[in-house]
Image (cartoon, coloured by chain):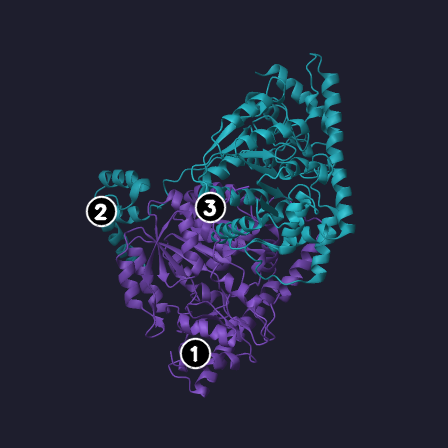
Amino acid sequence: MDSVFAAIVQAPEDPILGVTVAYNKDQSPVKLNLGVGAYRTEEGKPLVLNVVRKAEQFLVNDQSRVKEYLPILGLAEFNKLSAKLILGDDSPAIQENRVATAQCLSGTGSLRVGAEFLAKHYHERTIYVPQPSWGNHLKVFTMAGLSVKTYSYYDPETRGLNFQGLLEDLGAAPAGAIVLLHACAHNPTGVDPTVEQWEQIRQLIRSKGLLPFFDSAYQGFASGSLDADAQPVRMFVADGGECFIAQSYAKNMGLYGERVGALSIVCKAADVAGRVESQLKLVIRPMYSNPPIHGASIASTILKNSDMYNEWKIELKAMADRIISMRKQLFDALTAKGTPGDWSHIIKQIGMFTFTGLNSDQVAFMTKEYHIYMTSDGRISMAGLSSSTVPHLADAIHAAVTRAS
Amino acid sequence: MASSVLSSASLSFHGIHKGKSNLGGINKGKIDTFIKSKCFGRISMVAASNVSRFEGITMAPPDPILGVSEAFKADNHELKLNLGVGAYRTEELQPYVLNVVKKADKLLLEKGENREYLPIEGLAAFNKVTAELLFGADNPVMKQQRVATVQGLSGTGSLRLAAALIERYFPGAKVLISAPTWGNHKNIFNDAGVPWSEYRYYDPKTVGLDFEGMIADIKAAPEGSFILLHGCAHNPTGIDPTPEQWEIIADVIQEKNHVPFFDIAYQGFASGSLDADASSVRMFVARGMEVIAAQSYSKNLGLYAERIGAINVVCSSPEAAARVKSQLKRIARPMYSNPPVHGARIVANIVGDSTLFSEWNAEMEMMAGRIKNVRHKLFDNLSSKDKSGKDWSFVLKQIGMFSFTGLNKAQCDNMTNKWHVYMTKDGRISLAGLSLAKCEYLADAIIDSYHNVS
């Protein structure tokens, strides 16, 4: 019998998550997964934070807990605490009730809901995304009904920020266009603007009436400080203007698979925020009705309990510090080997990822000969490295760079 | 700080002024009126820049189903009764976390497994047991690997994945939904961009199934339409086809090369038996038909807030199933990347352990049993208190969590305004929210509304 689904072709593996699929198939004992951005310990194991286990024990012990549907916008307490985390406890925007927040499915879900809302209610349907950006951004925004353009961001020559290009491209954007900004620890490059550069970006965006949409997936993970990593977002909110913020707790609380995140829309007026909230529900209800309770309850428990909050900060800083240490070790190893090229970007870049500057041929070589798994754009997840595996990676990079092409 | 605000405001004012439609359709009318009515001074510059770009957004109405609970909460009357959303309540009208779920939660905490991202298609162990639960573990389609199963965000999320697949690969194809059906179905297909139309289902004269109308409408639909069927315990009516009627429905669907698309949110909850409640789906599959089936564990495992369900597509070959699964993944990735792990592990642990599975079956029989008891009591009260001779037996014949009372909107308003009984305006009451103790009160309310309000 001919299938009704005969016309459906095999979709390719997702380029990022597909790396782990390929890694899993490899039998080599020296294989290294530097693909997806998931933190690993020095022993190369996934980490469940102690404070997360504590929070879960607390929740399980609470006999009054039920599993009733959350409201469409999610756990109210989580939403308030999440907004405070990114905007600051004393944020006037929060005090003035100008922030509409919806618990969503981690960063992806927050971006998608925000984009669907914009496609439905905003007159400008173009979103400007940095070049390069997280691989899933293009699909998320396109599926939501927005059209995607890029703005200059990464300079391959300096392996740093192409600031002039960024200003030019955003300067040429139509007034009101949406601009995606990585709040900190740019993915995949690890290249962030300086505070001074952020201020210039802010002025340009405000002067053109562009709408900033922050993707905040690494708050606390970049520098080790939650407040420092929130500075760019807070600068924008301090000027009284509007913005969208997608938050993820996948990395900073290690809650990856629980899918915990929030979308906050900072509006100019409280009554606007109220109406925006009501319309967000209409986007969410036909997508999944209401969000999952487990992860948000864990996050909420941690955020509202000052002892747990402090424990979290300590564990978070430890993760961030280990990554910074891996950067230094890799840089030192390449320097010691005399690998041709300037590798200082490894220690200048920030966050989970390093944009090595390796091309796709070199990446393919490293995978084939050294069983190093990474995305073909040359991005490596520092979180997947340990002191014992740095030498193997350094060997692989050295071989890839020095081989005759 | 103040001067930079003004300078950016004056720049944006020029932006507004230069290009007439710079602020687009939503705000344009307001800004134009504003500019015409004020002088072009500093005040107008600052004020214009203080207008939100979302000023034109209107307040959305509350969700017709979920909004009922909100209204109920706001009511302080001591006799108030919430028969709105389909969430199971105990006789004491308290939410219920199944004992077997509490056990599973503790077990998970003890196991201390990691929280890594699931694959896009979800937890493999869950996908395996959920398909087995629905189709039967020894169903040939399982062995032949002809089922594409992807973990979804409960029923809603699973339906949405299938809807997006239909939109992408069957452009122009229609989904036929029953009249009436769960209120959120049309929203899902609308947002997914899938056209839909209705097939007759509920007959208000008999408070039963309009079978002839249903068959006629399915026959009349363009070939290759998707027919949305409730596997058991139809929501909102509680009226299910008989096994004989299911066979005829399958005949017609096969004749017209339609695709049967099952929504199974109450497996085990309708009759108390997981297998019995899956018989309609299994019959279609046994005929060799390709079938789409969305599952939810919200009600039968009480996992409402964990958002755990699955979309299954039974294909004619394992190759087709693999391709379909890959495309479902492609739809999920830009929506939420990968599904939440917790609920999936609970289901996998319970269904995968024979002791826990038996315990589950027992608790489910208990829940379904309580609802059957409540139906009987309500029927008894209605029959004895209503002197008009109206036939209330539909309350007994309907199955599952809901009863379609046949009350119209005005009568439903009376139920709420006079009697503080909260229900959806289509006349649906959730028996899961009714206790034996409150049956008499409810009977009074229904009788009053039916006879005294038009």
> Quadrant of the rendered structure where residue B261 is?
top right
Which of disc 3 and disc 1 is earlier in sequence? 3
Disc nearest the viewer among 2 and 3: 3
Q: Position of residue A36 (x, y in %)?
A: 51, 65
As helix, strand or loop, the secondary structure at mark 3 comes to: loop
Label 1 to label 2, Cα distance in Å? 53 Å
Residue A397's place in the image compared with B224, above or below, is: below
For badge 2, the amino acid type reads: Gly
Which chain has been coloured purple in this picture? A
Label ID, residue A7: 3
| Residue drawn at 45 percent across, 50 percent down | A112
Kindly identify which residue carries mark 1. A400
Number of residues whose C-alpha sits closer than 10 Å to that of mark 1, classed few (under 14), some (14–19) or many (20 or more)? many
Disc nearest the viewer among 1 and 3: 3
For badge 3, the amino acid type reads: Ala
Q: Are marks 1 and 3 on the same chain?
A: yes
For badge 1, the amino acid type reads: Ala
Q: Quadrant of the N terminus of chain A?
A: top right
Disc nearest the viewer among 1 and 2: 1
Assess whether mark 3 and mark 1 are in contact (beta carbons under 8 angstroms).
no
Does residue B115 appear to the left or right of A227 in the view shown? right
Identify which residue, A398 or B57, lies in the foreground: A398
Kindly identify which residue carries mark 2. B19
Does residue B367 appear to the left or right of A189 in the view shown? right
Which colour denotes chain B? cyan
| Chain of the residue where label 2 is placed in the rendered structure | B
As helix, strand or loop, the secondary structure at mark 2 comes to: loop
